[in-house]
Amino acid sequence: MTAQLPILTVAPLLFGAFAVTAGRFLYRRANYAVAALALALSFAASVLLAVQVFAHGTTTYFVGGWPPPIGISYVADPLSALMLAVVSGAALCVFLASKAEIETSYPLKNSAFFALFLLAAAGHMGIVATGDAFNLYVLIEVAALSGYAILAQGKDRAMLSSLNYLFVGSFGASLYLLGIGYLYLMTGSLNMADLSAIIARLGGVGSSTALDAAFGIILAGLWVKMGLFPFHSWLPAAYTFSAAPAAALVAPLTTKVMAYVLVRLIISLFTPREAWSVPAVNTLAVGLATAAILYGSFCALAQRSLRRMLCFILLSEVGYMVGGAFLGNRAGLTGTIYHIFADLLMTLCLFLAASNVERATGGRFSDMGGLFRRMPATSAALVAGGLSMIGVPPFCGFFSKWYLLSGAISAGSYLFAGALVLSSLINAFLFFRIFEIGFFRPAPGQDGGDHAGHAAALPLGRDEMPLARLVPLGVAASSLVAAGLLAGEIVTRVAGAVIPPGLG
C-alpha cells in the first residue's frame, strides 16, 4: 500500500467529486459528509506519504505501471511531500470552516460546489506530485477551470471578474504549453527527469536559441498564472467579489502552487545554474518582482475593506517568491521555498479570519470598531496572521524574509532588499491600523464617550463565529507559529534536500 501513497493523495478527491455529483440525484444531504471524508482521506494519505518520504527517501508511482519516459509518474520527494500535506490540510480547513457559508452562498448548487471544490483541490495536488511536463499542463487546467467556476458564484462583479481570470489564465497556460511543445520537439520526451538529462546533453539554457525560447515562454506562462506584476489584473477582483469559501481556497493555493512549479522547474528540469545562466532573465525577474512588491504594498494602503487589502498584499507576496527564485544564490532559493509554505499558511489564516469578519461586520474598516471584544478568537487569529505578514518572530513570515533578505544582499540586489523592508513596514502600518480600529474604536451604532471604554462595554464574543468555524481558523493560526519554530528543520530537510549542492 505504501507504494501507492502518491496516487492515494489525489484518488479520494476524484472519487469524492464523482460521488457528490451522483449524490445530487440520489441522497443530497450526505454530500457534505462525503466531500469532507474525501478531503480527510486525502490529508491522511498526504501525511503518511510525508512520513514515509522523510524516513525512507523519494517515492515514485508509475500510473498504469508504465515506467518513464513513456508513462506518467507521480514523484514524492521532501519538497513535494510536504507541499502535498500542506495543500491538502489547507483545503480541509477551508471546507470545514465554510459549511454555513456554502449553504448561504450556494443554496441551490451545493453538490456542484462540492464537486468543483474537490476537483480544484485534486488539481492543485496533482500539480505538486506529477513528474510529467504535459500532465502538469492538464492538471493546471483542472485546477484552473474548477477555480473559475467557483469564483464566478459570488456577488456583484464576480462573474465578470472570473471571466477576466479565465481569459488571462488561459493565456498563461497556453504559453506554458507552447514552451513544453518546443521542448518536446527538441527532446522527444515529456518526463521531467528525462527532459532534464537531455537538456543537459544539449548544453542547457543559453546554448541554443530554441532552448532559450522554450525557457522564456514557460517562465512567461508561469508568471501570468501566478499574477506577477504586470500580469496581475485578474487577481484582486477575482478574489474580492467571489464568495468567501472560494476565495479562501483559491487565494492560498493557486499562486503558491504555481510558485512551487516555478521552483520545481528551476530545480528539476533546467537546474539552477542553467536557469540563472542568462543575466537578462535574472534582471527582468528580480525587477518585476520588485515592482510587484511595491505596487501591491502601495495599492493595499488605499483599500478600505479587509479582503481587498489582503488581495493586494497577495500581489506583493508573489514578488517575494519570484524575486527570491532568481537572485542566483542558495539563500534566495531557500527563502523562496520556505516562503511558499509560509505564505500559503499566512494567506489561509488571514482569508479564513476575513471570512468571519465579513460575515459579522461586512468587512469594511469603518464597521470593525470593537472587533477585538466582539470577536476575540477571530481577532487573535487576525493578529497572528498580521504579525506573520509583517515578519515578527517566532511567526514563519520572519524566517522566510530573513532568507530572502540574505539572498538579496549577497546578490547585490539592494533595490529588491529595500522593497522587502518597505513592504514589511507598510504591512505593519496596515495591520496595526486594523488592530487600532478593532481595539480602540467603538462598534457601529455606539455614540459618545471614550472609544476604548465603548469597546470594553460590549458583550465579550457578541459576534463571534461558531466553534465549527473557529477550530479550523485556530489550526491555521497555530500553524504559523509551528512553521516558524520548525523553520530550521524545513530549511535543512526540505530545501536542503532538493537544492543541488555547491550553489553560492
Image (cartoon, rainbow, N blue to C red):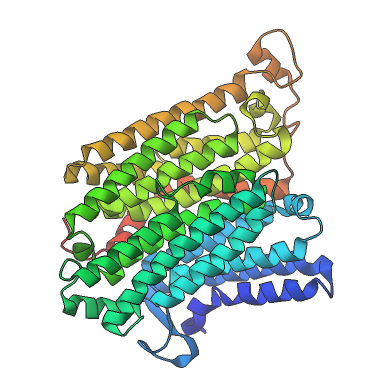
Asked where in the image residue 29 lies, by quadrant, the reply is bottom right
The picture places residue 179, in percent across and down from the top left corner, at 34, 70
The picture places residue 25, in percent across and down from the top left corner, at 83, 74
Q: Residue at x 70, y 34 (%)?
A: 362
Does any portion of residue 115 appear in the rendered image?
A: yes
Considering depth in this image, is 314 or 219 the residue closer to the camera? 219
Asked where in the image residue 270 lies, by quadrant, the reply is bottom left
Considering depth in this image, is 456 or 316 the residue closer to the camera? 316
Q: For the image shown, how many numbered marks are present on the structure?
A: 0
Q: Residue at x 54, y 51 (%)?
A: 251
Question: Looking at the figure, which quarter contains the C terminus?
Answer: bottom left
Q: With 428 as the anchor, is 144 left or right in this view?
A: right
Considering depth in this image, is 251 or 90 the residue closer to the camera? 251
Asked where in the image residue 450 lies, by quadrant, the reply is top right
Vertical side of 291 occupied by 49: above or below: below
> Which residue, as the protein is rendered here, is positioned at the far top?
449
Vertical side of 150 occupied by 228: above or below: above
Does any portion of residue 50 appear in the rendered image?
A: no
The picture places residue 455, in percent across and down from the top left corner, at 68, 19
Q: Residue at x 38, y 50 (%)?
A: 339
Vertical side of 329 occupied by 376: above or below: above
